[in-house]
Amino acid sequence: MAEGRTLRIVALYPQLMNIYADRGNLIVLERRCRWRGIGFELRGSGPGERLPAGADLYYIGGGQDRDQELCARDLVRLKRDDLAAEIERGAVLLAVCGGYQLLGHEYRLGDRTLPGAGLVDLSTVREDGPRLIGDAAIEVELEPGSRRILAGFENHGGRTHLGPGARPLGRVLSGHGNNGRDGHEGARVGNVIGTYLHGPLLPKNAWFADWLIATALSLEQPLAPLDDRLEDAAHRSALRAAGLA
């Protein structure tokens, strides 16, 4: 029973890691909770601050290179161990674009290397060549036997490569994905999800927002349905933009 529950979210670096309107993901989660009678609590954790404990979902968006470097060093120094403990406890972590890159071992940018949190077995490198930009769509299987499509926008110069300890979030149907070569997009390890899709992601994929809410609250019953005609239209529009019927 979801009504009367409260979804507690901590946004990491909400002022710095908010490129391409990634804050819109938090707004979607708040609205879809409120419409169902689910409480919503949002806290932020910026540079120099310890990670608040006890949240159901931790979130980090994308950012510019300078801001990303500041956050990378703060994440490793102050928050990594606490975040790993929260994930082990069962909390969900959603990381988008620059935040996704920070989940891995490192991000190499020419003669500089940003430290990664080491929460997911992946590495990212800034290679020569164009940025990977455009509307994209991927096929995901978040629950066994249930395949759905996530649609969004990608814009990244880094090429991400997964190690054997991680599996891709989805299969690229349209767009570039992690590196433009292997046909994979994002990464998933248990309740930790990273993706390059933003613009923001959840307004275009309301069903995924609901999955995050239900998973973060450990609900055994499905969430109450909503009138999602506008949300479904937004999803179809994003699919068309990505070249899918």
Image (spheres, rainbow, N blue to C red):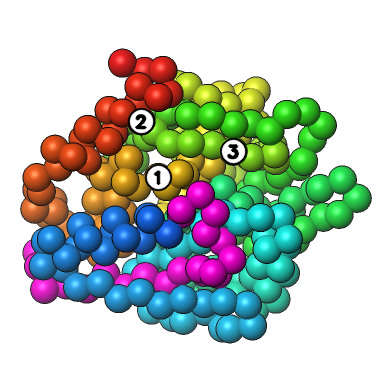
Does residue 3 show up magenta in the picture? yes
Three-letter amino acid code at the position of disc 1:
Leu
Tag on residue 238? 2
Rendered-image quadrant of the N terminus: bottom left
Provide residue 115's location: percent of width, then percent of height.
Answer: 75, 61
Secondary structure of the residue carrying numbered label 2: helix
Secondary structure of the residue carrying numbered label 1: loop
- Is 137 or 83 nearer to us in this picture? 137
- Is 201 or 168 nearer to us in this picture? 201
First in sequence: mark 1 or mark 3? 3
Identify the magenta region.
1-22
Residue furthest out toward the right? 111
Provide residue 7's location: percent of width, then percent of height.
Answer: 27, 70
Secondary structure of the residue carrying numbered label 3: strand
Kindly identify the residue that appears in the image at 16 percent across and 65 percent down.
34
Rendered-image quadrant of the C terminus: top left
First in sequence: mark 2 or mark 1? 1
Residue indicated by mark 1: 201
- Other-residue count near label 1 (Cα within 10 Å), few / some / many at <14 / 14–19 / ≥20: many
Q: Pointer 2 and pointer 1: residues touching (CB < 8 Å)?
A: no
Residue 93 is drawn in which quadrant?
bottom left
Three-letter amino acid code at the position of disc 3:
Asn
